[in-house]
Image (cartoon, helix red, strand yellow):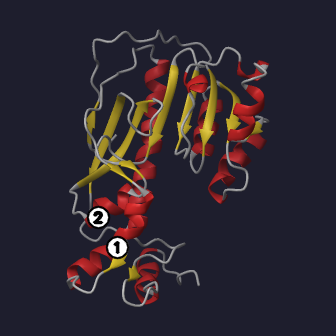
Amino acid sequence: MNGSSTCVNSDAPHPSVDKRQLRIVIMGRRAAGDALHECRRRGHTVSLVVAARKDPASTDVLQAAAEHSVPVVTDAMLYEELLPARSPILRDVDLVISYLYKRRLRPEMLALPRIGAFNFHAGPLPEARGIGCHSFAILEGWKEYGASVHWMSPEFDTGDLVRVERFPIADDETACSLLTRAYSCTYDLFLWFLGHLESGQAIPRTPQGDGRYYSRQEMEQAKRILPGDSPAMVDRRARAFWNRLTWGPISSVTGNGLQWLRIALCQRDFGIPAKQ
């Protein structure tokens, strides 16, 4: 893997990991489908997928589940039906994988797996907790971005770290390009994680310490181009909050999205017109 990494063992006890076939529950979206394919390719059992059926970002994982005949439930079904009924499908689970999943795991789910519950987060922790961190990385002039895998806790993005990978941010980075790179880095971390488990080594566990949480409200506020913004700041906001499927930055004077910026960025990054 490229970039710098954090992968430090603490003195806390680690669960034993053996090389046998693992039983895994995947909760996720986007490349969670690729993660499912990889688990099956390596001979592991994916006993359940938890996903939002109506979320377009769940399409790939739903297709992968269908291809491998893995049952799919929603978050509500998991907590209201399967867990209270002690469903056989949740017996002897070794791992719970949260892959770009947007919901907290409740205590009963965190306690379910023999080895642990792990979150794959498309941002470097602890400085990139919450929503839209890639946009703030551009807006605030960060030099690096990345991805993380961590032990899960009841709160978002705060559990002990397993590993963090970082890479440099380009001068002309957009939200779209940076998030694409972060997703790729996240999947590389997933491959590393499976290999680490299969090697029989202890799973690293390092407390995060203090970090920064970005909320959706902060993200919506930061999109607004203010009358006093310099041309450089307008450019930075345009890059920080643009992707092909949204309006990107908003003028605080007119309240309109800056369509001309989106068209130029779409042509540059994709060679296609912006979605109207």
Where in the figure is residue 17, as x and y percent of width and height? 49, 12
Above or below — where is 205 with respect to 77?
A: above
Residue 82, horizontal then vertical, whole percent: 76, 27
Query: Is the Cβ of the residue at disc 2 closer than 8 Å to that at disc 1?
Result: yes
Is residue 2 something one can see in this rendering?
no
Q: Image check: 260 left or right of 63?
A: left
At a point 21% along the width and 84% down the height, the residue shown is 228
**Amino acid identity at mark 1:** Arg
Asked where in the image residue 160 lies, by quadrant, the reply is top left
Q: Position of residue 67 (x, y in %)?
A: 76, 42
Q: Is residue 71 visible?
A: yes
Instruction: Give above or below for 25 relative to 125.
Output: above
Q: Which mark is residue 239?
A: 1
Q: Position of residue 221 (x, y in %)?
A: 37, 69
- Residue 138's disc is 2
Residue at the (71%, 40%) spot, across then down = 76
Of residues 99 and 215, which is closer to you in this image?
A: 215
Classify mark 2: helix, strand or loop. helix
The answer for how far apart the CA atoms under marks 2 and 1 are is 7 Å
For the point 38% across and 39% down, the residue is: 148
Quarter occupied by the N terminus: top left
Residue 211 found in image quarter: top left
Q: Residues within 10 Å of mark 2 (few under 14, many from 20)?
A: many
